[in-house]
Image (cartoon, grey):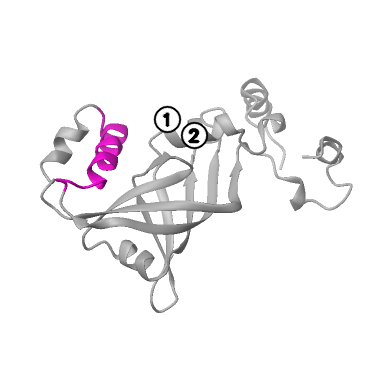
């Protein structure tokens, strides 16, 4: 497909397809991505009949684990109690120049740390307050406090060793090419 000159000029000015910005996130980029943005975590679980089920929820990333709070009747929590193996996806949908097209994928082991229980004396209330602050802003914890009497679960999702994958940018990883098809990537060892 041939682009008109105006479109080509806009692409060159914005450098939206800059292959040098593609590849895995560094550790500091990963920490920033997981802690300083309002992305939702999509948790994939297996239903009792073997079919996958994906649910988007709020989360916090602390101590090399994802933490989520589920309501008393959240099916995904009950599914994780039955089968703790799960997968997660966190993504930035915007591509350059508006975003980095960043994503994190992981296979995790879930642990239902507590619940269902109300906020008083719970561990989940501290995590839920941090999530409310992250996703809603300064008024979030106060809004959340109105539901402290409603029972919830605290869930920890720990990535398996070597099963957390990151990527950013719009170029393709070299594994998608045949030998010689992208010598620039082969030379970098990317």
Please name whichever residue, 172 or 151, is drawn nearer the observer in this view of the structure. 151
Say whether residue 113 is magenta: no
Disc 1 to disc 2, C-alpha distance: 6 Å
Residue at label 2? 33
* Callout 1 secondary element: loop
Q: Give the range drawn in magenta.
A: 119-137
Image-quadrant location for residue 37: top left
Left or right for 155, reference 126: right
Mark 1 Cα shell of 10 Å, populated few (<14), some (14-19), many (≥20): few
Q: Is the magenta stretch mostly helix, strand or loop?
A: helix
Left or right for 66, reference 69: right
* Callout 2 secondary element: helix
Picture residue at 76% right of the left edge, 51% below the top: 175
Left or right for 119, reference 83: left
Picture residue at 71% right of the left edge, 43% below the top: 1
Instruction: Give the vertical position of 53 relative to 7 (above or below).
Output: below
Pick the quarter of the image with the C terminus: top right
Q: Which mark is residue 52?
A: none
Residue at label 1? 36
Residue 23: percent from left, percent from top:
67, 38
| Residue at the outermost front position | 121
Instruction: Give the vertical position of 186 relative to 150 (above or below).
Output: above
Residue 178: percent from left, percent from top:
84, 53
Picture residue at 79% right of the left edge, 51% below the top: 177
Residue 52: percent from left, percent from top:
44, 68
User: Badges 1 and 2: C-beta atoms under 8 Å apart?
Assistant: yes
Picture residue at 26% right of the left edge, 46% below the top: 123
| Residue at the outermost right position | 180
Instruction: Give the vertical position of 182 relative to 156 (above or below).
Output: above
Instruction: Give the vertical position of 25 relative to 161 (above or below).
Output: above
Image-quadrant location for residue 22: top right
Please name whichever residue, 89 or 98, is drawn nearer the observer in this view of the structure. 89
């Amino acid at each position: 497909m041939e682009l008109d000159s105006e479109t080509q000029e806009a692409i060159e000015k914005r450098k939206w397809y800059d292959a040098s910005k593609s590849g895995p996130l560094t550790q500091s980029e990963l920490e920033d991505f997981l802690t300083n943005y309002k992305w939702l975590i999509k948790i994939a679980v297996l239903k009792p009949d073997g079919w996958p089920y994906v649910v988007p929820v709020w989360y916090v990333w602390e101590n090399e684990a994802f933490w989520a709070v589920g309501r008393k009747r959240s099916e995904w929590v009950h599914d994780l109690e039955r089968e703790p193996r799960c997968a997660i996806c966190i993504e930035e949908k915007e591509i350059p120049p508006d975003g980095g097209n960043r994503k994190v994928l992981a296979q995790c082991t879930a642990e239902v740390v507590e619940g269902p229980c109300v906020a008083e004396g719970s561990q989940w209330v501290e995590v839920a307050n941090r999530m409310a602050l992250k996703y809603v802003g300064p008024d979030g914890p106060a809004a959340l406090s109105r539901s402290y009497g409603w029972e919830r679960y605290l869930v920890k999702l720990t990535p398996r060793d070597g099963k957390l994958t990151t990527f950013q940018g719009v170029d393709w990883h070299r594994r998608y090419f045949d030998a010689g098809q992208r010598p620039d990537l082969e030379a970098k060892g990317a």
